[in-house]
């Protein structure tokens, strides 16, 4: 994932809403939706190269998704274990708090390339930093709206500012608001100030600053919106098989039939 939008405990009727875009090479094979685990049941897209996922949605109500830290130069990412293992590892737990405690205790950050993760449930939302330099760091987030891209959560970001300006802080769950999230995820507008905010070492094209990326062979491949209700029913999960500016959202089914 390269953009995540989380509403934790501020949406009436939905204690957690998590939406995001996955950016990747268009040529990298993947399936948009798969049963990632049986017990507990976990849904999400699957990367067919490394076998992991960018967003794992647990039937028990734990949802986890990540964004990658871009390498400093093209092709500089070392061959380590797939970061796609990490959302699945978190979503298998009965609560986000249990998931984070086990994650901090068990995960060796040096085995993975650096990334940032949001993991939440009906009662809490956590931000995780995974880096071979600093290890695993966790922070419990306050109720509210939180937006994460390919930078640390609190880093200055024209993309985050652009997304935040187009979405309410405390919305009411409904089709109109969800269509608004989908519209923001589909935007290819380059945020004001994006060019000036980039460091001289950033080799990536300016198009990656948009919410929905189209930059030659690379861009937004998938989009997802998950709403976790107050009851113990499985999360409502919609996804697009392709960039959300082109591909329609479709409903994920927890079971066939």
Image (cartoon, helix red, strand yellow):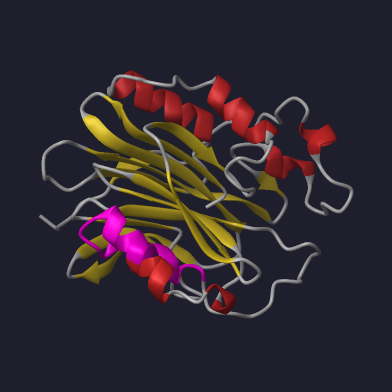
Residue at 62 percent of width and 66 percent of height: 134
- Of residues 45 and 40, the one drawn nearer to the viewer in this rendering: 40
Residue 186 to residue 153: above or below: above
Left or right of residue 92, residue 212 in this image: right
- Quarter residue 58 falls in: bottom left
Q: From where the camera sits, is residue 197 visible?
A: yes
Relative image position of residue 212 (x, y in whole percent): 59, 39
Left or right of residue 190, residue 119 in this image: left
Relative image position of residue 163 (x, y in whole percent): 56, 28
Magenta residue check for 87: yes
- Of residues 51 and 134, the one drawn nearer to the viewer in this rendering: 134
The quadrant of the picture occupied by the C terminus is: bottom left
Magenta stretch, main secondary structure class: helix
Residue at 24 percent of width and 42 percent of height: 122
Residue at 38 percent of width and 54 percent of height: 64
Residue at 46 percent of width and 59 percent of height: 54
Relative image position of residue 38 (x, y in whole percent): 19, 70
Report the span colored magenta. Answer: 83-101
Label tally: 0
Q: From where the camera sits, is residue 46 visible?
A: no
Relative image position of residue 208 (x, y in whole percent): 69, 44
- Of residues 242 and 12, the one drawn nearer to the viewer in this rendering: 12
Magenta residue check for 223: no
- Of residues 207 and 89, the one drawn nearer to the viewer in this rendering: 89
Left or right of residue 205, residue 237 in this image: left
- Quarter residue 114 falls in: bottom right
Task: Name the residue at the right extreme.
Answer: 200
């Amino acid at each position: 994932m390269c953009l995540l939008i989380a509403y934790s405990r501020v949406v009436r009727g939905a204690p957690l809403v998590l939406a995001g875009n996955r950016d990747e090479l268009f040529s990298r094979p993947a399936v948009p939706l798969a049963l990632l685990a049986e017990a507990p049941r976990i849904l999400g897209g699957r990367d067919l190269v490394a076998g992991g996922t960018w967003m794992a949605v647990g039937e028990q109500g734990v949802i986890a998704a990540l964004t990658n830290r871009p390498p400093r130069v093209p092709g500089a990412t070392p061959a380590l274990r797939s970061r796609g293992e990490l959302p699945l590892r978190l979503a298998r737990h009965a609560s986000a708090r249990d998931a984070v405690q086990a994650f901090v205790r068990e995960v060796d950050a040096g085995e993975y390339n650096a990334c940032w993760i949001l993991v939440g449930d009906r009662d809490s939302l956590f931000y995780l930093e995974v880096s071979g330099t600093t290890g695993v760091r966790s922070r419990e987030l306050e109720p509210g709206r939180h937006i994460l891209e390919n930078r640390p959560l609190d880093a200055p970001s024209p993309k985050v500012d652009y997304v935040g300006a187009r979405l309410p802080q405390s919305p009411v769950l409904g089709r109109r608001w969800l269509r608004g999230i989908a519209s923001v995820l589909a935007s290819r507008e380059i945020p004001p100030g994006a060019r000036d905010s980039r460091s001289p070492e950033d080799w990536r094209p300016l198009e990656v600053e948009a919410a929905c990326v189209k930059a030659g062979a690379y861009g937004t491949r998938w989009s997802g919106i998950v709403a976790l209700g107050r009851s113990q029913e499985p999360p409502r999960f919609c996804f697009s098989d392709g960039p959300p500016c082109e591909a329609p959202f479709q409903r994920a089914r927890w079971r066939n039939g």
